Every structure is written in structure tokens, then in C-alpha cells.
Amino acid sequence: MEPQQRESWDVFIAHAGADLGPAKELAAALLTEKLNYFLDAARLRAGDSWPIRLKAVLAQSRVIAVLVSQHSDEAYYLQEEVAIAVAISRKPNASVRVVPVLLRGADQMHLPYGTFTLHALYEQQGGLSAVATALAQLLKDAPPLQASGAIARTTELLDEIWAGLEPELFDENDRRRPEDFGMRYRSDGEDLVARWRNGGEAQRVTREQLDAKLKPDLLHHVEVLERAMEINKAIWDNRHPRRVLEPQSKQVAEEAARAMAEDLAGVLDTVEAAGMWLDDHYIAIRQIVGQTSGTRST
């Protein structure tokens, strides 16, 4: 099945409402650098639900530029954007970068939680045009995507989330523990490998085979999907810190699965597009996705 393609942004501009002026100035400078950007004031559509749109846009952005000012502490949506962005950027080999941009009048005390140790850019050092140039260089220097690692990471995240969802979505006799999942996908160098529980190799797709199967548009899809799953995992860990749901929470589990249905289906579609077959527990996930999304069949 061909994975659905998604939009992409070079830079997501996170800002407090009072800093819309500098945000627009940075957006214009990014256009000069031939970078596309997401700025809520320019990109949000009538009727958009911002919490839902936020997750999608953060997953589709390569750099999150956080404008920091004296207004940052009181900006609720900015704090939420930064919390999600920092969570996904902390993952090993994360493909998204969070860059604080201190506006004139701001200092280190205004940095949102989680950004204190990140390398920052400063408006007072050349203006926002210099900031845009630095962001363009950062994107230019970014390492190329390793498809096998990204696919392996998305399935790992799916398994971690599913281990908390499955006990609530199936009857007791149909439930499995994570250690009972028959197959896991892992990166072996630049190859993608499916391994059984005992570590034995079930299937291997080489780098050359991946290159032949995953054309540039699908490689982009893999990169976006990896970020989307990182965000799903960050939200899941925040809402369910013990990684499991309460015994009576089947409705909560169904709602969580519905919210992630497109991303879960995207992981499975990408695994198949890479030439891998699906283990039984992934087929069960596809069945649940079909039931919750209302748009897919088993």
C-alpha cells in the first residue's frame, strides 16, 4: 500500500502572541533564504483545531525556532509547543532540531523549560536576517536520513505505545505482552532487518533494496512519520506516565488509538512499502486502526 504523502516545513516559528511582529519579520527573512516556514498567523485555516494541527505541523517541521522574549513565560500555546518539541528532539538520532532565538530585551532567564542547554541564536547579533541565515546553514548541514534507522525507530515507538493500548482494546484471552510480540524491526548498518524474539533473523532488506523501493517522496514521508510517532509517544508518556491505562479505561484506549490512527497506519504501510511482511501483532493493530478511523478496512 502506498503511504499517504504529507506537507513539509523547513522551520516552525513558535512565538508568544505579543511577539507576532518579530515572528513575521523572521518569516520574511526565511523566504529570502528560500526556506518555507509555518507561522500560525499565516498558515492556520478557518475551522482548524489548533491542538490537532499543532501535532501534525511539528511532525512536518525540520527545525522549531522558539522566539524567546519577556512574554514567553505567559504564553500557554508557546509552552505547549516547546514541551512537545523538546521531548522529540531529545530522542537518540532525532531528526528535528529545537533552536531558541532570543529577541532583543530577552535573556537566559526567559528561556522556556527544557531549552536552557540548547544552542541559541540572538536577534541582537545581526538581526533576524542573520538568524534566518544561521537556520538555513543548520538545515544544509543536517545529515541525510537513514531510512532503515527511521523505519526501525517508528516501529519501536509503535510497539511501546501499543504495549499500553492492547490490554484495554482486546479481551483478556486475546491479549499479549510486549515480550510475546513475534517480530521486531531493527536497523543493521544501513539494512532493515526483521528479527524474531530469540534474535534470529527473519527477513532482511538491504540498503540497495531500500533505495530502489523508497523514492525521495517516500523517504520524506518516513522522516515525517518518525517525528509524528515521537510526538505521539511524548503525548502518551505525558498523559499516561506509567505507560498503561487504568483497568476500566477501554474508552480512553479507543480514543487514543483513534487520535493516532493515521500515524499507526502510516507506520504499517511504510514497513510494507520497504518490502517487509507484517507480524501478527501488526495485523491486529491494522484491524484496530480500521475500526477506530472509519476509513480503512482489514
Image (tube, rainbow, N blue to C red):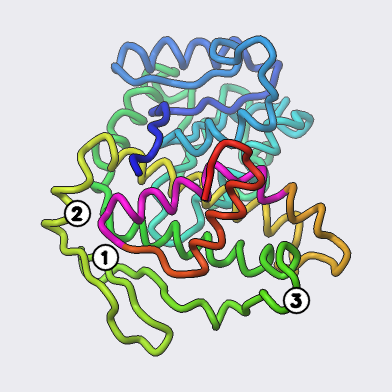
Magenta segment? 256-276
Please tell me which residue is depicted at 31% across the width and 86% down the height of the picture.
Answer: 200
Q: Secondary structure at mark 2?
A: helix
Q: Which residue is mark 1?
A: 192
Whole-percent x, y for residue 64 in the image? 49, 35
Which of the two labelled residues, at mark 3 and mark 2, occupies the earlier sequence position? 3
Using the image as rendered, state which of residue 236 and residue 89 is in the foreground: 236
Q: CA distance from mark 1 to mark 2?
A: 8 Å
Q: Secondary structure at mark 3?
A: helix
Residue 172 marker: 3
Q: CA distance from mark 1 to mark 3?
A: 33 Å
Which of the two labelled residues, at mark 1 and mark 3, occupies the earlier sequence position? 3
| Image: 180 above or below 215 | below
Residue 210 marker: 2
The reply to whether the C-beta atoms of the residues labelled 3 and 2 are less than 8 Å apart is: no
Q: Nearer the viewer, mark 1 or mark 3?
A: 3
Q: For the residue marked with disc 3, what is the amino acid?
A: Glu
Whole-percent x, y for residue 80 in the image? 69, 38
Q: Does the magenta segment cover residue 268?
A: yes
Q: Is residue 235 left or right of residue 276?
A: right
In this view, the residue farthest toward the bottom is 198
Whole-percent x, y for residue 166 in the image? 67, 66
Using the image as rendered, state which of residue 230 and residue 163 is in the foreground: 163
Please tell me which residue is depicted at 38% across the width and 23% down the height of the picture.
Answer: 132
Q: For the residue marked with disc 1, what is the amino acid?
A: Leu
| Image: 240 above or below 29 | below
Please tell me which residue is depicted at 52% across the width and 52% down the height of the picture.
Answer: 230
